[in-house]
Amino acid sequence: MYVQASYDSMPKMDLAAVGLSHDLGYRKMNNSAPMGTLQTKAAGETLFSEGDEADAVYEVVRGTLRLYKMLPDGRRQIIGFVSAANMFGLSPEGVRAYTAEAVSDTALRRFPHAAFDRLIDEQPGFARRLLNVASDELGAAQEQMLLLGRMTAMEKVASFLLVLAKRQGRDNARSVDVPMGRNDIADYLGLTIETVSRTLSRLKRARLIGLPAPTRVEIRDRHRLEMLAVNGAAGVA
Amino acid sequence: MYVQASYDSMPKMDLAAVGLSHDLGYRKMNNSAPMGTLQTKAAGETLFSEGDEADAVYEVVRGTLRLYKMLPDGRRQIIGFVSAANMFGLSPEGVRAYTAEAVSDTALRRFPHAAFDRLIDEQPGFARRLLNVASDELGAAQEQMLLLGRMTAMEKVASFLLVLAKRQGRDNARSVDVPMGRNDIADYLGLTIETVSRTLSRLKRARLIGLPAPTRVEIRDRHRLEMLAVNGAAGVA
DNA sequence: CGTCCGATTGATGCGGGTCAAATTGGGTGG
DNA sequence: CCACCCAATTTGACCCGCATCAATCGGACG
């Protein structure tokens, strides 16, 4: 399992949730042969649930997943969306802390923990890479805490759109793909679907965005949107 | 810098914020000689600020710190409290993502990143330990997202008290020390100080807790408090 | 063309924020 | 030991942003 380290221009990886991308080189580490087994999930299907035994890490090949936690009465908090070229599911203790479901049809590569652990021990630098990924994830989670705890609905929605855009972003692409429904957005931002919908409508009315379809947002005035992401509804009808 | 691994019964460590504790053995790793330089901060003093260059990791020897992020208009979200025997401040990219301030008078040990990185590379197993810590932190951050996004004030406060108790916990200790003020609690739970105060008062009136002093909470009915942490205000006057 | 499901829009209510005032208690000096 | 001071906490009155409840709306599909 020893391989030559080569960390440049490799697939991206997310450790658990939040959309940052990282190159880990797990592919080249196996001499360019892709390790891990491929599998698919149709939209809405569950990959694993809170409480399940955690015995593998996943890479998203195609599609998007939502990761969420639930309260006993059904209230749901989505802790992150994971899309192509990102990884998730690393949890050292044996039990899943959240559920993973396909938002759209997805293809996934599965890496059993055992193999992953071996790499950590045998491949110098690999662990540090993972650590960097974990720290970035942690940073993103902390950013989301600021959003959930201290931002208004308008700030939350504006921030969300900008993060989506940046994540997909060919730089300043006008059109952003929104694969998840309003329900998912609401449960990610700590709002209701009605508030998400109303807020998007306000942004549309103010001509900051366009909504050609529910799953597509056209950013018309990025600058003002960025102002809103920090200053709230000030300046929007 | 090579040492013999020995991971049992060692000081605890927090990677960034949230109160989980982990044994990393960084002390024994240096042949029992404590590495790192000692320093102190008086209550209210700042250790580092958001945006500063990150060049060290810290261990809390005595006291408690708050880690927080702020919006440009002054709104603050505390992302975690760190107390004795825990660590924080690991961030691979060069810039601090949050500010660290002393809640009470503190003593800290400072570990420059360079030395830490060397340990990661040279000490087999150390990186994996760190990774476990990071993953636990991430899990705690996700738990806090659920709290911030989907819990009521009552659930937030009840959860907070129970986490505090468990963290200090000689098992089911009645009396919990609350070193941080109402302002800090509010900014940690995404509430205002008035709401925190009112909620604590309700719990006191309902005889679930006692408040012998602002910095001390006596847990009188742990069971009902646990119910509240999940079911909200149902069943409290 | 009808059905269905997600999204939008409208009307109303409430949990928690805001503004303001009283209370408490720890620290200090007489 | 006591009186005072000051900051933190608590309590009160009121208000608002977002949730809730309730219709429509609109596009995809048969």
Image (tube, coloured by chain):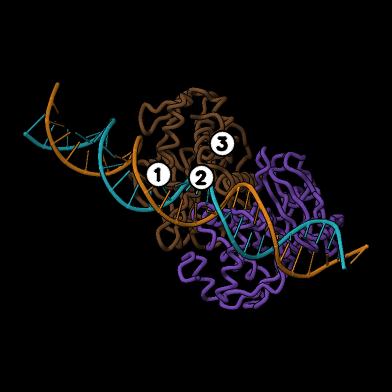
Chain colours: A purple, B brown, C cyan, D orange
Circle nearer the viewer, 2 or 3: 3
The answer to which of marks 1 and 2 sits earlier in the sequence is 2
Q: Is mark 1 on a helix, strand or loop?
A: helix
Q: In this view, does A107 lie above or below B111?
A: below
Q: Can residue A5 be seen in this view?
A: no
Q: What is the C-alpha distance between the residues marked 2 and 3?
A: 32 Å
Foreground residue, A120 or A113? A113
Foreground of the two, B229 or B55: B229
Chain under label 1?
Answer: B
Q: Mark 1 points at which residue?
A: B193
Q: In this view, does A210 lie above or below A146?
A: below
Q: Which residue is painted at 62% across and 57% down in the image? A: A194
Q: Mark 2 vs mark 3: which is more N-terminal?
A: 2
Instruction: Name the residue beneath numbered marker 3.
Output: B232
The residue at which mark 2 appears reads as B87
Few, some or many residues within 10 Å of mark 3 (<14, 14–19, 20+)? some
Q: Which mark lies nearer to you, 1 or 2?
A: 1
Q: What residue type is labelled 1?
A: Ile
Which part of the image, by quadrant, shows the N terminus of chain A?
A: bottom right
Q: Which amino acid type is shown beneath numbered disc 2?
A: Met
Instruction: Measure the alpha-carbon separation of dots 1 and 2.
Output: 28 Å
Same chain assignment for discs 2 and 3: yes
Report x, y in % for residue A131. Answer: 63, 54
**Picture quadrant where residue A8 is located:** bottom right
What amino acid is at disc 3? Gly
Marks 1/2 in contact by CB < 8 Å: the verdict is no
Say which quarter of the image contains residue B74.
Answer: bottom left
